[in-house]
Amino acid sequence: MELSCRGLHLVKGTQRLEWWGRLFRAFSILLLVLVAVCLEGCGGSDPGRGTQSLYVEAHVTSDEAGATRVRVQVRDGDGRGRIEEAAVVRVRGHEEGEWVLDFEGRDWGPFAGGFHLLEGLEWQRGWHLEVEVGEEHWLEAYLEMPGLCTIIEPAADVTYRRGDGFPLVARWEDSQRRHSRSIQVELNRNDYSVRLPGDVFRHEIASSVFRRDGGERLTVQRWNEVELLGGTIGSSFRGATFCSVDFRVD
């Protein structure tokens, strides 16, 4: 009788262990799924790290052809601090390449400023940013970029007839099917600008917006952006693509 009870306890103990094992495996799978979803939602970007002693504004931009421009401004302390002309600014492409940006000064009357600039690159999936001032001040981060943008509708050189009362339908696509957190849709002559949530690919503009006939340009900007945790308050890293189309309003 005693052996039977012991055997029963062993069976129940084994069952409990198996139950806890299944629960642990299920929890692990759920955790991996949640991490994957989070990474997808965050766009794979990393706000980075650093000494939190530099103010950095970094912009990577491209048109629909993929011509890429990098502009970085580095200041000592906050956004009103001294511009760090001697800062070493590097960018590394997600796929390939590493470049050091040259500083280009600017004069606006009694005011002087400037940026670290680099042009003529090809658009890549993401960019690593590294900034160093001496041996004591630095930051680094990574930003995943949206893909290149192409406007599908309206087609180039078509005529939109505002008198018909129908909205202008604007549609665009991401050639690499990548994530974007924010979108800006603008008209050049008819004073229209609206910000949309990311990953939207269609927008309607009411006919009442169009008060001027003649040539018009529709521009769509899509971007990702992170706050640079390694910099001082307000430091940021933005990557944006632009696409546009010219048409007529009648």
Image (cartoon, rainbow, N blue to C red):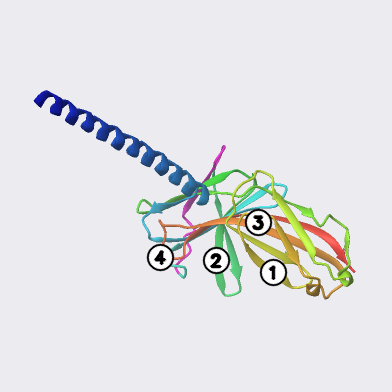
Q: Is residue 215 above or below residue 59?
A: below
Q: Are marks 4 and 1 in contact (CB under 8 Å)?
A: no
Mark before the other along the chain sequence, 3 or 1: 1
Query: Magenta segment range?
Result: 81-98
The CA span between labels 3 and 1 is 15 Å
* Residue at (87, 57) in percent of width and height: 157
Task: Give the crowd class for mark 1: few <14, some 14-19, many >=20 residues within 10 Å.
Answer: some
The CA span between labels 2 and 3 is 37 Å
Mark before the other along the chain sequence, 3 or 4: 4
Task: Give the crowd class for mark 3: few <14, some 14-19, many >=20 residues within 10 Å.
Answer: some
Can residue 133 be seen here? The reply is no
Mark before the other along the chain sequence, 2 or 3: 2
Quadrant into which the N terminus falls: top left
Under tag 2, what secondary structure?
strand
Disc 3: which residue: 200
Quadrant into which the C terminus falls: bottom right
Q: Are marks 3 and 4 in contact (CB under 8 Å)?
A: no
Mark before the other along the chain sequence, 4 or 1: 4
Q: Nearer the viewer, mark 2 or mark 4?
A: 4
- 148 vs 105, left or right, is right
Image mark for residue 193 = 1
Identify residue type, mark 4.
Gly
Under tag 4, what secondary structure?
loop
Image mark for residue 77 = 4
The percent position of residue 37, horizontal first and vertical second, equals: 49, 47
